[in-house]
Amino acid sequence: MVSQSQGIQQLLQAEKRAAEKVAEARKRKNRRLKQAKEEAQAEIEQYRMQREKEFKTKEAAALGSHGNSAVEVDKETVGKMGSIQTSYQRNREGVLGNLLKMVCDIKPEIHANYRFAG
C-alpha cells in the first residue's frame, strides 16, 4: 500500500509540475504577445508621425504659394474697387441725367412693326 501511495504522490507531484510548466508557458506567451503588440503600436505611431510630417511639409509648400497669391488677389481687388468707385463718382450725374431725360421726355410714335388693319 505504501508503494501505491508513493506512486500516487509522484503522479500528483508530476501533474503539479506539468501544470506549473503549462502556466509558465502561458505567461511567457502572454508576455510575448503583449510585447509584440507594444512594438507594433510603437511602429504604427512612428509611421503615422512620419506621414504626418510629410503631409505638413507638403501642406506648408502648397499654402505658402497659395498665401502669396491670396495677398496679390486682395491687393488687386482693392485696386479695382477703388477704380470702380472713382468711375462711379465721375459718371453718376451724367447717367442719372440721361435716365431722367429718357423717362420724362416721351415722344409718342408708332412702332415700325405696327400694321394698319384695313
Image (cartoon, rainbow, N blue to C red):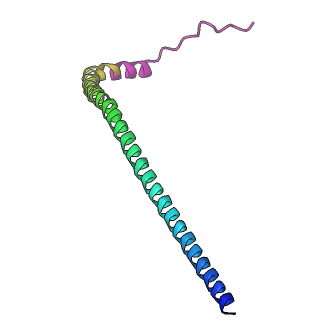
Query: Residue 70's x, y, as percent?
Result: 30, 29
Task: Inspect the magenta stretch and tell me whether residue 50 lies in it.
Answer: no
Task: Inspect the magenta stretch and tell me whether residue 114 lies in it.
Answer: yes
Report the magenta stretch's main SS.
Answer: loop
The magenta segment is 96-118
Q: Nearer the viewer, residue 81 or 60?
A: 60
What residue is shown at x 57% (from left), y 70% (from top)? Answer: 22
Farthest bottom residue? Answer: 1
Q: Nearer the viewer, residue 87 or 43?
A: 43
Vertical comparison of 70 with 19: above or below: above
Vertical comparison of 11 with 72: above or below: below
Q: Is residue 38 left or right of residue 97?
A: right
Query: In the picture, residue 65 is in which quadrant?
Result: top left
Query: In the picture, residue 60 is in which quadrant?
Result: top left
Quadrant position of the N terminus in the picture: bottom right
Query: Residue 23's x, y, as percent?
Result: 55, 72
Query: Residue 77's x, y, as percent?
Result: 29, 26
Q: Nearer the viewer, residue 58 or 4?
A: 4
Q: Is residue 24 left or right of residue 113?
A: left
What residue is shown at x 69% (from left), y 7% (from top)? Answer: 116
